[in-house]
Image (spheres, rainbow, N blue to C red):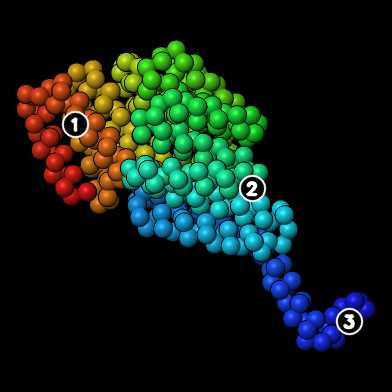
Amino acid sequence: MRRRNFLTATTGTTAAVAVPLVARHSVGTSDVIRLRSGVDDLVALDATRGGHDELERRALAGAAEALEKQKLGASQRIRQRLFSVAADYMCGAAWSAIDDKRTDRARGLLDRALYMAGMAKDSIAGLEAWNMYSVLALHRGEYTEAVDSGYAAQATAIARRDPFYASLAHARTALAHSTLGDRQAALRSLGCAHEALGKASLDDPRPSWIAFYGPAELLALTAIARDKIGEPAEAEAASHQALASIPKEFRRNRALATARLALSQLHQRDIDQACATASTVFTLMAGHPIPGRMRSLLGDYYRDLITLAPDASVAREWADRYRTEWSRA
């Protein structure tokens, strides 16, 4: 009590020294909670619109604010939590760039996200970054790096502790192996992903960024891997299972899974059914811009279609629809 009275009775010089100390200790848990809610808002925006400039801008602004607050954190624990929030924002910015097919930019953003995750000592944020590194490497054609990034995700503390996160890491590794054409490694990783998810609690509280993952998403990823290793019938079956359980609010995920279903049907030479399925992607995305990643996938379908059935009337009709929708997107 006497110390408090002394401080309040001091001269203006002493008070001037005390003010910065109060400011330094003004950042705490409420700031972390507020900034974390902003991350959740961006995840919801991504689910609605996909990657775009405004999402990236808001994510970068959130990261900048979290880093500025970190300098004024009341304790080491608060400062680490703010680094963690900044890493999540930066991953959000990177994901927006990946989804919008701006892969060169995404790489630099992920480098920064991984640094922040390390400063936060946050293995969940670290796994988030490595997961995106694997996705990014696949889009850049750097398939060996995609495998290595999947293994890095598996090595994080959270993946070793929680089979839910381990499942996602194994699934990413499986996709990378399948793109390299390594059938046995892909199937082995898929087996690990399904086994781990079977052991995981699906009701535990987790960050909003991983809400997309679960049995339905694993089936969708399984369909991609199966198609890439030359098993389109198994891929089609997995896609149907995925679409039966992907929540309706994940419209973009449903559209992506539908496009993958069309590809697996096309690779079985079921041209009419494949084109009908592919057309429903445009129906699902009606009224919404088609993100760059989805546009690229539809481009893959179009190229395979004109390669396998260049003279089929249904292929020409779908190509006309594709060009019309592409110009509107």
Crowd around label 1: few <14 · some 14–19 · many ≥20 (10 Å): many
The residue lying at 13 percent from left, 44 percent from top is 324
Q: Separation of disc 1 and disc 2 at Cα?
A: 44 Å
Query: Mark number for residue 120?
Result: 2
Q: Earlier in the sequence, mark 2 or mark 3?
A: 3
Residue behind mark 1: 302
How far apart are the two marked residues, 1 and 3, measured between alpha carbons? 78 Å
Name the one closer to the observer, 136 or 213. 136
Outermost residue, right direction? Answer: 2
Q: Nearer the viewer, mark 1 or mark 3?
A: 3
Circle 2 residues within 10 Å: few <14, some 14–19, many ≥20:
many
Give the numbered dot on residue 6: 3
Name the kind of residue labelled 3 in the image: Phe
For the point 44% across and 50% down, the residue is 93
* Image quadrant in which the N terminus is located: bottom right
Q: Earlier in the sequence, mark 1 or mark 3?
A: 3
Mark nearer the viewer, 1 or 2: 2
Q: Secondary structure at mark 3?
A: helix
Q: Which SS class for mark 1? A: helix
Mark 3 neighbour density, 10 Å: few (under 14) some (14–19) many (20 or more): few
User: Circle 2 — which element?
Assistant: helix
Residue 176 location (% of width, % of height): 42, 25
Amino acid type shown at disc 2: Ala
Q: Amino acid type of disc 1? A: Tyr
The image shows a total of numbered marks equal to 3
Which numbered marker is on residue 99? none
* Residue displayed at 37% across by 58% down: 54
